[in-house]
Image (cartoon, grey):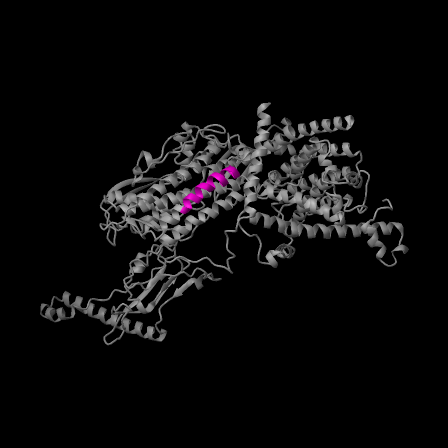
Amino acid sequence: MTETLTNPVLTLLRLIPGVETLSDGMQVLLSGFLAGVILFAFIAVFALYAVYLERKVAGHVQDRLGPMEVGWHGLLQTIADAIKLLNKEDFAPKDVDTKLFTLAPFLVFMTALSVFVVFPYDSQVSIANLNIGIFYVIAISSIAVPAVIMAGWSSNNKWSLFGAMRSAAQIVSYEIPVGLSIICVIMVVGHMGMQEIVEFQGGGFWKWVIFRSFPFNFIAFFIFFLGSLAEVNRTPFDLPEAESELVAGFMTEYSGMRWAFFFLAEYGNMLAVGLVGAALFLGGWQPPFEFLSFVPGWLWFILKALVLIFVQIWLRWTLPRLRVDQLMYVCWKVLVPFAFVCIIGVGLWEVLT
Amino acid sequence: MPEIKTEDVYIELGRHPKAGFAAEDLILQMGPQHPSTHGVLRLECVTDGEIIKKAVPKIGYLHRCFDKHAENENWQQVIPYTDRIDYLASMNQNFSYAITVEKLMDIEIPERAEYIRVIVSELQRIASHLIAFGTYGLDMGAFTPFLYAFRDRETILDFFEKICGGRLLYNYIWIGGVSHDLYDGFKEECMKFLDYFEEKIHNEYNPLLSFNKIFIERTANVGIITPEQAIDYGLTGPCLRGSGIDWDLRRDDPYSIYDRFDFEVIVGKGEKGTVGDSWDRYMVRIWEMVESIRIIRQALQQIPEGDIISEKVGKVVKVPKGEVYGRTETPRGELGFYLISEGGKGPARLKSRSPCFSNLCVIEEMSQGYMLADLVAILASIDIVLGCIDR
Amino acid sequence: MGRYFRDIYISVFTVLKGMYVTMLHFFSKSVTVQYPKERLEIPKGSRNQLLNIIEDCIGCDQCVRACPVNCIYMETIKSFEGDELGETSTGRKKSLWIPSFTIDMAKCCFCGLCTYPCPTECLIMTDVYEYSKHDRNDLIFEFADLDPIKAAELREKDAIRKKEKEAAKLAKLKAKEAAAKAKAEKEAAEEGKTPEKKPEDNPDKKTDNSGEENS
């Protein structure tokens, strides 16, 4: 951790009286705990309102209104739902592999949570500014695959197993186009740290990576967006949960709070890919115009991510879903070749200019 | 507990212990509680991973003894039960029963009643096809078309509620006519709705779902029923026409006053894939809605004033002795009633030939070799109603 | 290769078209109503809960016979001499006591067949559709307004009358058996009184089958 950065966790840690007297190990432990609490609260609050947004968008797309009862225009509806989920019986079906069954939702949630550590929330603000930030994001998000397989396998349910296998195949496959499209960004920026990538894009929206080496990074952005849709299991790539085919996929046997953790993880992942997309391609906390820099950076960052999330939700309520083989076709025969072309294009562009 | 050796398991499974482990088929029970079996159908699937080797429909979860029940009711009382055969197209079921009994009684019914019957049954056809369209979208993972379909179906149900008081089960088409006359202003409201709805088909349903590339990829070349298969299995309705066979009872065995209207019989042409695939069956329904709009427009323009129920049918329906088979084209195909009357107060024997049952039978043959997701597409393209299958 | 790019083009194009269609709906008015707060107007003649205006009911039993699911149960007792039953609002004279008129709305299939034959139009389908109950038995609605004490009295009286009639009938039979032709004229005077047939509830004659299934 470089001292020039403002670390919200360390700032908070210093506010605790008598923290200096603790040993270094304890301080690290405490800061880790604090980071976890902050991120959990952040994701939980985001998930509550992302669900609200999703339901409202769905409602208005479908000529309905969505939740209207709890709170003003249903603003507290998701909180009421969460309380209901918390009150539910902690229930595991007979013949499940209890250890894996219990562990899986937390592992899935953990991966969703860990990703948030490296994001550059504002100029000089991030919890941990790794110099391999984006690499860390890709690596950590892969842990979700075994967790999902654990959930599907331990449920002792054929639908769950189908969902888990589909999910594993899908996430593993789609990491390749996503990784390739991220390489396009790294080739332009020349650095893997998230903070550095965002700093590189300062000075107006035309300096954003998405408009660099046009049109290759532009295409790379779409590849990244589609791949991220698949990685977070959103329509049209929501095969692992395809409710009309697999009932609920790998979550079939989960209920109550365990299910809520999957749910939180799903929305956490949605936010994560939104933030990654915003940081890599859309300039992160950089304002689109210099004169708009009075608006705090974190607001820009979140706003850009929310736009991407909105498009995700919009797509979900528009499109049917693909079939497994078509999913693989899109990945290997469309996205991967295009991503390679983008890499070559960006490379040539960078060499020639 | 005795120790179980792996070799014993192999022997028990009928394999040589040294043959090693061989992959087994997965037996998957799809239903009776499953989101896309459209009710309480159970499909016993033998799959190899996601590939369906065999899917056998198991029915009977919704059996209500309609045929037997009808023997204990009088002629009039059977009508509410016919509503429940196919609860998404009750008007057509009423219609079918009524014309069968009328055939046996050999009576003419008033002109106005005939027109009203055609109008309501074509409206019902639109409502039923809307459900087929919406649930197809839902099964393919698109939620929004479903809600749009229900929005427009709601208007049709409002018409029916205003006409006869029922929203889903009408008991409207009676022996000898219909129970209520159309209300004032129906013609204008209906015309307005038809204009609105035709625009919606072209500008909303088709771009959103029908011609969506993902949807086409999911349905074209999936679940192909060849014309020969379709005839062998006795398919009727959109499933038969989807296979390219030009057969519609409204035109080929005209009942009621269908011969007075100008409409086309929609046939699957295999535009996006092969003739007889799921997309063809789906599109037949979409274009049939447009044809129904044409029929209703003509009927609304021609409808005369007059009685709505035949005077020859008294308070108590008296049916002479005899046997008769009457059939109509419902949204799902040919619904026929075979009636035996012994001159009593009700049918001595009633047998209904429901379209969904014959249509479902073909699924075992056509689903082989497709993926699990395709099975859902095939099932939805047949557009089954379990009430109609089990009766 | 051409097809490959064409497919991609069509996919992107149709997806964008679909997104355009859904986008238009962001700005369109909602078609739903917020149910408990707003309600749709129920059209005239809508078929919902049954109501019997017992003041107008003459106990003709036609609705019971019309019902395809046997959800209407009616008990009638023929009036006794000197009973004043009054008239219906249409001026029809009543001649039957109705100690019980019960409709089991859990069985009702809302076909409306019972309302058509009603000669005094006292059995009607109202626009009340919110009558959910926690117990199925709460859905059995009793419409008869006869005082239970009075009803019991009537039933007792009716039983006595029946017994008398049966006794008379028996006596008649015995007399016939005795072939006493001399008494035949005397009995002929009494013959105008045929024994009253009392319609009885027959709830388990047929299975109820009024459930509606949803797809």
Q: Is residue B200 magenta?
A: yes
Nearest the camera: A316 or C67?
A316
In the image, taking residue A329 as reference, residue A133 lies left or right, namely right
Residue at 73%, 36% (x, y): give it: A209
Q: Quadrant of residue C64?
A: bottom left
Q: Which residues are magenta?
A: B192-209
Q: Quadrant of the C terminus of chain A?
A: top right
Q: Considering depth in this image, is A246 or B382 the residue closer to the camera?
A: B382
Relative to B73, say whether B208 is above or below: above
Question: In the picture shown, does residue B356 fall above or below C85?
Answer: above
Horizontal side, residue A61 vs residue A214: left or right: left
Which quadrant of the figure contains the N terminus of chain A?
top right
- Residue B146 location (% of width, % of height): 50, 44
Magenta residues, dominant SS class: helix
Is residue A258 on the magenta stretch?
Answer: no
Residue drawn at the location 37% of the way across and 43% of the way down = B122
**Residue A52, image x, y percentages:** 62, 51
Task: Name the residue furthest top.
Answer: C1
| Total count of labels | 0
Quarter occupied by residue A73: bottom right
